Image (cartoon, rainbow, N blue to C red):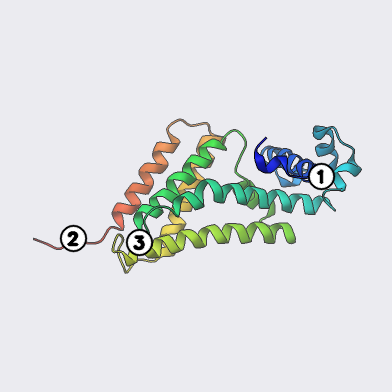
Amino acid sequence: MNITSKFMRKGELTRAAILETALQSASRHGLEGLTIGLLAEQMNMSKSGVFAHFGSREDLQIAVLKLYHHLFEQEVFYPSMKEDRGLPRLRSMFSLWVKRVTQEIASGCIYISGATEYDDRQGPIRDELVGMVNAWQGALLRATMQAQEFKHLQADIDPAQIVYEMYGLILALHHDARFLKKSGSVNRAETGFERMIQSYAPYKSAA
């Protein structure tokens, strides 16, 4: 237990433990598979005990999403922000994103599974999920535009197209590695990214 945890109140520690277990469950069974009853059983708690920390199942699901987003930022976004703006930062964002996806092969990516669960549902959970994905795509878009400003990429290309292609590579990686259990999926994703970057590299003037 770290120093911060020592000073947390018992209720905060319990809530954090519930959320961690809920995140593990949601990663494997989806957000819709997350129930108060199942979570209470996993935590050896009563349903009322879990409800004391989360007013409803929906509140619990949103809290799980926020925790997942926080961890994603800590592992992918913030480390990438330490890199130089432009292509170095964009490369880092993709590389760390790939690393996180490979770590989630056994459990699943909530951003990807959540998109399948809530693509035709309306409500606060979908809104929260869409907002988080849009925030990440916005970060990728800014990094791409900075790469154009620094002349690391062609100035006349559509930066949204690069973000789209990056997302496509990640989706293909998740599908092949998790669903098809294909080896070499990470290398294919990395090769695809490098080929894409090379295709959008600034034109070299003739000697």
Q: Quadrant of the C terminus?
A: bottom left
Q: Which residue is mark 3?
A: 147
Q: Which residue is mark 1?
A: 11
At 44% across and 37% down in the image, what residue appears?
Answer: 186
SS category of the residue bearing label 1: helix
Displayed quadrant of residue 150: bottom left
Tell me: 183 left or right of 55: left
Could one spot residue 26 in this view of the protein?
no
Q: Are marks 2 and 1 in contact (CB under 8 Å)?
A: no
Tell me the number on the disc at residue 142: none
Tell me: 145 left or right of 50: left
Tell me the number on the disc at residue 204: 2
Of the residues shown, which amino acid type is indicated by label 2?
Lys
Q: Measured along the vertical axis of the image, is residue 184 above or below residue 97?
A: above
Residue 169: x and y in percent read 45, 47
At 50% across and 52% down in the image, what residue appears?
Answer: 78
Q: Measured along the vertical axis of the image, is residue 73 above or below residue 20?
A: below
